[in-house]
Amino acid sequence: MIFPVNAALERYRERMDSLEPEEMVINLGPQHPSTHGVLRLELITDGEIVKEVIPHMGYLHRCFEKHAESMNYGKTIPFTDRMDYLASMNNSHGFVMGVERMLGLDQKIPKRIEYIRVLVCELNRIASHLIAIGTYGIDIGAFTPFMWCFRDREHIMNMLEWASGSRMLYNYIWIGGLFYDLPIGFEDRCGEFITYFKPKLKELEALLTKNQIFISRTANIGVLPADVAINYGCSGPMLRASGIKWDLRRVDNYSVYPEIEFDIPTGKGEMGHIGDCWDRYKVRADEVAESVRIIEQCLTKLTHEHKRTPEFDPRALVPKKVNLKAQDYYVRAENPKGELGFYFITQEKSDIPKRVKSRGPSFNNLSVISELSKGVLISDLIAILGSIDIVLGEVDR
Amino acid sequence: MLIEDVRNLICEHIGDDVIVAEELLGLQPALVIKTNMIREVCFLLRDHEQTWFDFLSCLSGVDNGIQAGTFAVVYHLASIPYKTQLTLKVVVPNDRGTTLPVVPSVGTIWKTAEWHEREAFDLVGIFFDGHPDLRRILLPDDWEGYPLRKDYQEAEMYHGISIQ
């Protein structure tokens, strides 16, 4: 039996060639600020109403999986940074965790290293959510939050640059350890930032959360019911906004998260239905506050129980060569955007994997756009797309 | 729920011959399912009240190598109510000729599978039977070959542009 490999492509072309008289095709992107990168959406519209959305991806495809098959595990870490380039620390943390578990190293990592990892990951989570909130504001016409968010994010970028030597793509978390220990004075600087940032967070909330224009644009728009969210593989703030308390930091209890107190914000439908765009915004804003709490606890630990000592070597456990037996392993971690997964298939006596599949949260979260935007106005489609918070580096990998 | 219970559940409801092999030694145990029965097994595991595997974390297409002569599709399921995980695999022999290896699509069970299957089709060249829209997703529509296959040869030119 021969299967028609090109049948779907022909069906798609036929659909685009045989439009009804009232239908019109609008091409949104790939160069459009509200698509948050090089995403192209083909809209079939009837007047102002969107009838169908056909997403086209791949403009930023950089062959992560092919690269990973040609180099060893340590060399792949910089490539993971470039997937979700707004949360590079979280990406490399997920990748490194998978390799460490396969090596059996994960229980031996010193607590100080784990706390530093969690600290930088949560700083990066705040930075990522600030971008999400700021650009979401600008998508629907509020300019000030964008400037304020970028101003505050810049502090985090500077701190992480101080620690790792790079502004966005860090390569800081290594298999079995870290690139360097935190620079001297980092903990104090981080504490200063937290003191500075807390009132700013309140200002930001006052600017957006209760803003009537913002509420009118987002409440009851793009309502995503919980069952649809699960079926489409949505995770992270998308899933939590639909009312499901699902956070891998708590479910899997990885790293030192079991020792840290924090809550999991979920959507409550305060301004409309559970799972609307406003809820997704609110969950992110609440998560920033939770991350601040986590950072405070990490700083206490790093300055007291696990404080800096002269003999502490963050590279002590870094293996010279990653020697694995043939096995396969799927690791998942909570990224700012959702569940980041890596599926490794290793080769016997080789430090080059046979296959690495990465499951990007943005990729899965974006797949729900066609479902969410049936019959909405074009302006609401922009609000929905912004609330999904995608990073094209991760959609296309 | 342990993997033995899942195995017994599948044997009880669908049949003993559905599970071709078991991989119990690794960090994550896996069940290898008969290719043409994967859809029934997934339906059962998603909807049965003892399993509720309602979340498909990841679907990966794998080229097992030229010597093995097989392709595999690996399903990573997660259950949100029970907080459990499960790995399923199907293995399809293929001689890398003109026909692609064929696996039934699970897009009707988890919508998220649709894009993952498009990706596996795009990069590994696995045909998913019953998929509503199996177009390439990351590469251009007119791309030739499947880059994640072990025998993939890079083309020299693409639309008159040298790409080597």
Image (tube, helix red, strand yellow):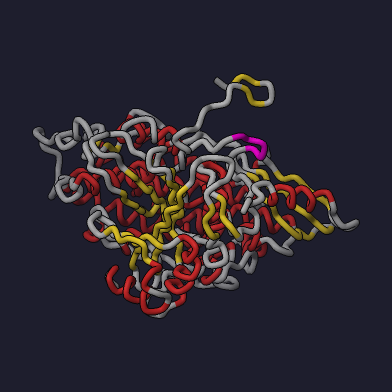
Q: Is residue A30 above or below residue A13?
A: above
Left or right: A12 in relation to B94: right
> Is residue B16 depicted above or below A376 in this figure?
below
**Rendered residue at 61%/19% (across/down):** B162
Quadrant holding the C terminus of chain B = top right
- Give the side of residue A178 with respect to residue B69, left or right: left
> Farthest left residue?
A311
A127 left or right of A184 in image: right
As rendered, which of B141 and A359 lies closer to the eye? B141
A219 and A29: which one is in front? A29
Q: What's the magenta bit mostly, secondary-structure-wise?
A: loop
Q: Is residue B142 magenta?
A: yes
Q: Is residue A134 visible?
A: no
| Span of residues in magenta | B140-144
Residue A72 locus on image (x, y percent): 31, 32
- Residue shown at the point (51%, 50%) measured from the top left: A362
Q: Decide: is A263 above or below A110.
A: below
**Residue A180 is drawn in which quadrant?**
top left
Q: Is residue B3 magenta?
A: no
Q: Is residue B162 above or below residue A265?
A: above
Q: Quadrant of residue B17?
A: bottom left
Task: Name the image quarter holding the N terminus of chain B.
Answer: bottom left
| Residue at screen point 45% across, 58% down | A236
Location of residue A134 in the rendering, given as x and y in whole percent from the top left corner:
55, 48
